[in-house]
Image (cartoon, grey):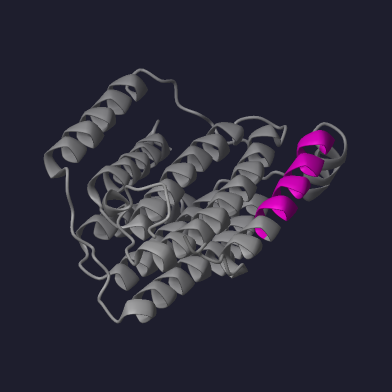
């Protein structure tokens, strides 16, 4: 087993365990930190698989953006009312049955699959060229989508809607 | 490498995400579950991309990340609004559409 494979298994273990820990933790802040551990180990898996661009984007965007947003959400919502956030569970039986049966179904489907042989690193010039040729339209559309949704999020969160008096 | 260890990892992440969305009552943890499911899809994309020479799967994974960021930003903004108005972050208790007068 090479070092890369050992690292792959190590990060898969870390990611899987911390993802499961989100389910069982009693503290919502710990849950977000566990999500951060999962996302970072997934980024390491991407880098080990040769998709370094995706891995670095994952670290920048998820660890730097989404997790910070979630922590902001926790701090703002628990500060507003000085009540601890409700983290109780419901639908426990249904959720467990649904997710475990889906996991079993996926494992059954994957059993007969041929193994994939990794063919090496994706080079940055190939990514740049395909971003501006084959994927030019999705690239532009995602830029517009990002602009609209971030501006919309700021407007939704900042506007002071007045209640109409009857 | 052993055939499908990464596929099993992605399936595990997806099922944990689904379980979070179904089981947890807090909106924030449901958003966390959605992020986990999108990540599982990304792991699959990058894994199947690693056997070809074209970066198609990796590009698709980057676009999935962009859409996930949009979803998280808008979802959290709506959650803040709903929290201000209803003083709760439990979707079960947000059950009225009209303003309370």
- Residue located at (61% from left, 59% from top): A153
| Magenta span | A136-150
Instruction: Residue B69: tell me if it is visible.
Output: yes
In which image quadrant can residue A93 be found? top left
Residue lying farthest to the top in this orientation: A112
Image: B70 above or below A141: below
Image: A163 above or below A76: above
- Residue located at (36% from left, 56% from top): B27
- The x and y percentages for residue A125 are 83, 46
- The x and y percentages for residue B58 are 65, 40
Residue lying farthest to the front in this orientation: A166
- Residue located at (58% from left, 69% from top): A160
User: Is B14 placed left or right of A122 in the picture?
Assistant: left
Instruction: Residue A120: tell me if it is visible.
Output: no
- The x and y percentages for residue A115 are 45, 26
Residue lying farthest to the left in this orientation: A93
Tell me if residue A138 is in the magenta stretch: yes
- Residue located at (30% from left, 57% from top): B90
Tell me if residue A31 is in the magenta stretch: no
Q: Is the magenta region chiefly helix, strand or loop?
A: helix
């Amino acid at each position: 087993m090479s070092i890369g494979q050992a690292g792959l298994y190590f990060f898969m273990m870390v990611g899987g365990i911390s993802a499961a820990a989100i389910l069982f933790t009693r503290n919502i802040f710990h849950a977000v930190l566990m999500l951060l551990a999962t996302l970072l180990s997934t980024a390491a898996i991407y880098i080990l698989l040769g998709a370094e661009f995706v891995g670095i984007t994952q670290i920048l965007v998820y660890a730097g953006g989404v997790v910070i947003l979630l922590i902001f959400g926790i701090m703002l919502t628990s500060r507003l009312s000085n009540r601890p956030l409700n983290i109780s569970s419901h639908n426990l039986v249904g959720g467990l049955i649904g997710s475990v049966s889906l996991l079993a179904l996926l494992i059954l489907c994957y059993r007969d699959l041929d193994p994939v042989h990794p063919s090496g690193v994706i080079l940055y010039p190939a990514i740049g060229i395909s971003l501006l040729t084959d994927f030019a339209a999705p690239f532009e559309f995602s830029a517009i989508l990002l602009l609209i949704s971030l501006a919309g999020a700021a407007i939704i969160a900042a506007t002071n809607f007045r209640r109409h008096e009857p | 490498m052993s055939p499908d260890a990464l596929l099993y990892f992605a399936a595990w992440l997806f099922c944990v995400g689904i379980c979070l969305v179904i089981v947890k009552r807090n909106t924030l943890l449901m958003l966390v579950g959605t992020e986990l499911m999108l990540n599982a899809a990304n792991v699959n994309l990058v894994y199947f991309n690693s056997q070809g020479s074209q970066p198609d799967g990796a590009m698709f994974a980057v676009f999935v990340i962009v859409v996930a960021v949009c979803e998280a930003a808008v979802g959290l903004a709506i959650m803040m609004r709903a929290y201000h108005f209803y003083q709760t972050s439990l979707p079960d208790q947000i059950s009225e559409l009209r303003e309370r007068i």
